[in-house]
Amino acid sequence: MNYFQLFQATFDAFDSQIALLDRAGKIIALNQAWKNNSINSCLANNTNIGDDYLKICKTIAGREQKIAQEIVDEIEAIANSEKTEFVFKDDNNHLASENQLIITIKQIKLDDWLGILIIQENITQHIQTELSLRSVVEGTAATTGEDFFYSLVYHLTCALSVSYAFVTECMETEPERVCTLAFWCKQDFGQNFEYNIANTPCEQVIGGLSCYYPRNLRNIFPLDQDLVRLNAESYIGVPLVNSSGIILGHLVVIDERPIEDGSTELSILKIFAARAAAELERQKAEKKLAYNALYDRLTNLPNRHLLSDHLHRSLEKYRRNREDKFAVFFLDLDRFKYVNDSLGHSSGDLLLINIAQRLKTCLRASDVLARLGGDEFAILVEDIKTLDDATKLAERIQQSLKSPFHLGIHEVFTSVSIGIAFSEPSLDSPEELLRNADIAMYKAKSLGKTRYELFDETLHIQVVNRLNLETDFHHSLDRGEFKLHYQPIISLVDGRVIGFEALVRWLHPQRGYVSPEEFIALAEETGKIIPLGWWILQEVCYQLREWQVRLNNSSLTMGVNISQKQFSQPHLINSLLQILQTTGLEAKNLQLEITESLLMEDPQTTMETLKQLKVLGCQLHLDDFGTGYSSLSYLHSLPIDALKIDRSFVEAIDSKGNNGEIVEAIVMMAKSLDLEVIAEGIETKAQLAKLQTLQCLYGQGYLFAKPLEPQSLYAWLNDWTDARSAFF
């Protein structure tokens, strides 16, 4: 195959008209498009292989003569190697009455042979596409959001001269259905609608294919009644594909007439489908951001921000009309942490989802259920008339949660503590309402959980006082406001002082002495219990050693309570050893008092720590025995030295022996385990007598001495020397 045969085989596939000339201007080869003169160019009329193309061009007359002569001049210049290429654009349709052309003349070299290639290309469709594109671009350039889609369908129908255009979005909950975002119907925007894509031309488009039906559309899709309604004859549809390749919807134009050559329309639709997909993706992202800003991701309930908006509106209604009363319920799950810790956070999340669903069943459609975070929920209930309405709802909620929740293979029971706050004229903001309901909820928690409480101003005052107290507490240790008092422990056989129990007191500069029930809880919550505990241990060891020396009695002991948080400190043993070495106190004289709840928190770790304390030489006392949850079968394995009978049991006995069975059982059990027994809270001679009868060997209480300041001890010892004979 020679070069010219190769030319013929290659260029016959092109739509452009192509001719090959030799250096003298003789036609060597023509492709099929040139032979057919498909673009009706006067520069290709009556031309055949072997003709002198320059001569033919020189015979052209009329308005095309000047252009033809320019073509001749350029061919001769290229043949003489004065230039290698020339491009002419016929913008005014001089050369082809119905089409706009672009003519390219190029020099080509094949070995030693030099030729000229002429390409005549019809750019009419390209220009029409550009004009249509420019029209749609200019019409939609300044629009975004919903306006963009309306502008798009309007300008598409104008630019493409079609009757209908619409853009759709796939419905997330029903993938077989779409809804229109904008619809142009002949002369105006039509009502948006949704429809099932089955048996419609849109089915293939939503499947990912661009579709073009030039005519007979209703016959091809006879089941599509919308096509009948629109009198549709032709259809072009393009999918809207987002950046992840997901189909979001489609862009469609429909006409009542055939669309014979839809290539221009299809090209334009593809371009604007990409823009529409990007806009729709942006809108979806914005909606998702807006949704996430107002709704809880886990439960899909309104979050705190959206609840606050609802509360604002309810407050405004109430201010306009005091009859529009409402209430806020603050709910906190009881023992939710144990579900997370034991079953994992995924189970905890599933529990929260199930609780949200169950709470909805208790509410009206107008009520607002929100998740505030963690295991906290809130409910806004409008049109509430009486206190009884609120309490009935709280009881209904409590009742609904009594049935177990099934989390995979696990069955879980839970409950909620509920605080209720009502709309009041004095309230200024949603935050105050939530705060009041929160305060009432914590009151319910403190009273035993699984209950509801109503807010009143007294609760608020208590919370403010507690907050102020907490603030003062943070500085109390540094300011030296803590004082240690000591209550003597007496031998119930002969009245000898065998040791002391250290009790911490907080002397507030304004309030005076603060109850331990108040500040110990604060210390636990704030973590200050640990530095406070170490300060106490060091002080009591110094104090006991001083008394041992001054009283010449090295057998005196000191009991001191150790908190659960301090007990779990990894450096407990080393720190305690350092204190003993610094103060000079022997470990056997230090009695560490622990509670039953501490024992049950982490039995294995606790047992290991207790053994280390015994190796150190400390005595271990189980405090407030009988009030906790320790197993009697477990008690014998603990390395403890004594049980301290809680004051509540001591108060219940008298000299006649009534209600003394529990104390008697504790004493007998202790003896069987070779443990000492110390009775707390002895206040009457009758109690003393009963304890002596039961052979309880040690005790403490107001009958002998109140907790004493260190400087008062010596005076009390002198008095006790004279007074003890009255008891023993």
Image (cartoon, helix red, strand yellow):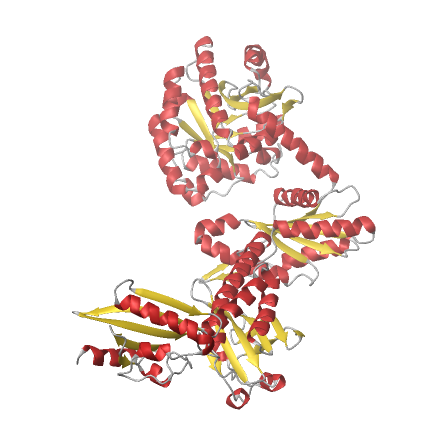
- Of the 4 image quadrants, the one containing the N terminus is bottom left
Is residue 78 shown above or below 334?
A: below
How many numbered marks does the figure carry? 0
Q: Position of residue 713 (x, y in %)?
A: 55, 13
For the residue pair 327 and 541, the one nearer the viewer reads as 327
Residue at the image point whose x is 70% and y is 37% from the top:
460
* Residue at (64% x, 32% y) in the render: 466
- Residue 70 visible, this orientation: yes
Q: Nearer the viewer, residue 125 or 692?
A: 125
Does residue 136 appear to the left or right of 315 in the view shown?
A: left
Does residue 663 lie above or below 88 as drawn?
Answer: above
Instruction: Work out whether 549 lies above or below 381.
Output: above
Q: Is residue 389 left or right of residue 150?
A: right
Which residue is drawn at the image coordinates 41% and 27% (left, top)? 619
Of 268 and 628, nearer the camera is 268
Foreground pick, 182 / 555? 182
Quarter placement of the C terminus: top right
Residue furthest top in the image: 550
Q: Is residue 451 visible?
A: no
The spot of residue 600 in percent (x, y) is 45, 42
Dividing the picture into quarters, in which one does residue 429 lie? top right
Place residue 458 in its image quadrant: top right
Q: Position of residue 366 (x, y in %)?
A: 71, 61
Question: Residue 590: image x %, image y %?
Answer: 42, 23
